[in-house]
Amino acid sequence: MIATTMPTSPDARILIVDSDPDFLGWASGHLKAPGVTVTTAERSEDALAGYQKQRADLVLAEVRMPGMSGIELLKRLRMNDPNAMVILFSGIASTSNVIEAMRLGAYDVLGKEKLPYELRTIVESALSSNESRRITRAQAAEVPTETIQETIIGRSNPMQEVFKMIGRVSRSDAPVMITGESGCGKELVAGAIHKFSPRTQKTFVAINITSIPDNLMESEIFGHEKGSFTGAVTQRIGRFEQCDGGTLFLDEIGDMPLAVQSKLLRVLQEGEFCRVGSNQTLKCDVRVLAATNKDLEAEVAKGTFREDLFYRLNVVRIHIPPLRERREDVRLLAEFFLQRQSARRRGPTMRFTDDALSLLEAYDWPGNVRELENTIQRACALSNSDVLLPSDIPLGSTAYSRHTNPTTTITRMRDALTALIHAAQTMPDLELMPWIDKELPRLAYRHFEENAPKTAKFLGTTTAEVQSHLEPAATKKPATKKASNA
């Protein structure tokens, strides 16, 4: 281990762990300042041994390390010292790693490419933080990271913040309000909170409030006794009983009837309820997560949602940004959905062209991730090739509008002509280029209703250039044609 020195409070000790000596040299110099000692280690095992001999105020560690990983180092540091302050960084940090790191008590998880811009600020904030970070050994209980599958995907900054919030709130039993537009993945976030919580071995139940008739809502959630109302021919166990010890996710909570809201409030406050038609009070230990795409503050103001229930549920809020605000995730999500569809088809691995991916990234996705997934599924079902072109991807509310859209029709022709160009390059005796040079402007001119400026804009050329490639007959006015025929 080597020592150097960094810019923050005096008498601070920082330990940096990475298998790359060049990075260690850069990080040590970057954090160098009077009064602060920086030590480095190339192996997590050496860092753990050094920490046990002399504790550091802050540990910076790479997630992906040979031997003991950064996640495992974090676990062991926090098991031995629940107040250990650790920042993890990685070139490629998976969703599971980010959530698991925050669940185990990491101060932050940083992308390695951002360290030159963010490292000093984050380190100063960590060292000056007075936050109490005490947790129990039970809360730090090991969840095997390798068994956790990626359910939420995103590398954008907004989604990284969502992952960090999931990791933080999963350590407690506090109610969480998850907000966001329809189709952005609120149930996936709720499932991840449960999966990374101490309740992970218990039941997770999700209910969509809008799918349950108002007159059956109370029975669905709290259960009922036999004969309690017409049609109650047997006793029914409600959702709270079903997931005792686990997590209950109430989706679209803003649509819950007021009568049921008051009974839900009692469960949150007292941890007890009664089945419909029963006077027996039942106890339950259930963590409640809720989600909505409504403005609940506005609903409270209108009197359609109880204010006291709102504050009970809104202890922690996680907002999921719409897909149009994190376009850098579109490519990652599209590739994931395409791989999944390829596996289901049990055929050749499918792939996008660069133009197809650019088309997906440019679209606003009003239906968010759900719309993207459905679009990829539909494109795979309709495609006759294992390569998806822009023309294979139906966008918008009408799935088959592309068949009657002149612009998209020309796009498909252009894609076909591109394939012909490649064929001409391998078979030079086929003189396709002169034909292509003439045919594409002519077809485009026809489909754009003989509008030369529109044709030129689509082809990326000038109006004069388009007209120079057209046959004389193509530019004649309809009246002239009639006169000639006469």
Image (cartoon, rainbow, N blue to C red):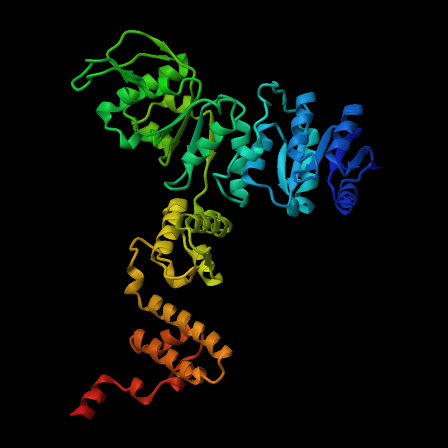
Question: Which quadrant would the N terminus be assigned to in this image?
Answer: top right
Does residue 81 appear anywhere in the picture? no
* Residue 448 picture location, percent across and down: 32, 74
- Is 7 above or below relative to 390? above
Q: Which quadrant would residue 96 be assigned to in this image?
A: top right
In percent of width and height, residue 484 lies at: 20, 92
Q: Quadrant of residue 207?
A: top left
The residue sitting at 44% across, 31% down in the picture is: 190
Q: Is residue 321 visible?
A: yes
Determine which quarter of the picture holds residue 92: top right
Q: Quadrant of the C terminus?
A: bottom left
Q: Camera-side residue: 44 or 29?
A: 44
- Residue 255 place in picture, x, y as percent: 30, 30
Q: Residue furthest front?
A: 346
Please say if 148 is above or below 441.
above
Q: Residue at x 53, y 32 (%)?
A: 165
Q: Is residue 142 left or right of residue 368?
A: right
Q: Nearer the viewer, residue 289 or 414?
A: 414
Where is residue 418 shown, x and y percent of the image? 44, 72
Against 315, is 393 above or below? below
Count of marks placed on residues: 0
Image-based side of 111 in relation to 371, left or right = right
**Farthest residue, direction top:** 280
Residue at image x 68%, y 26%?
76
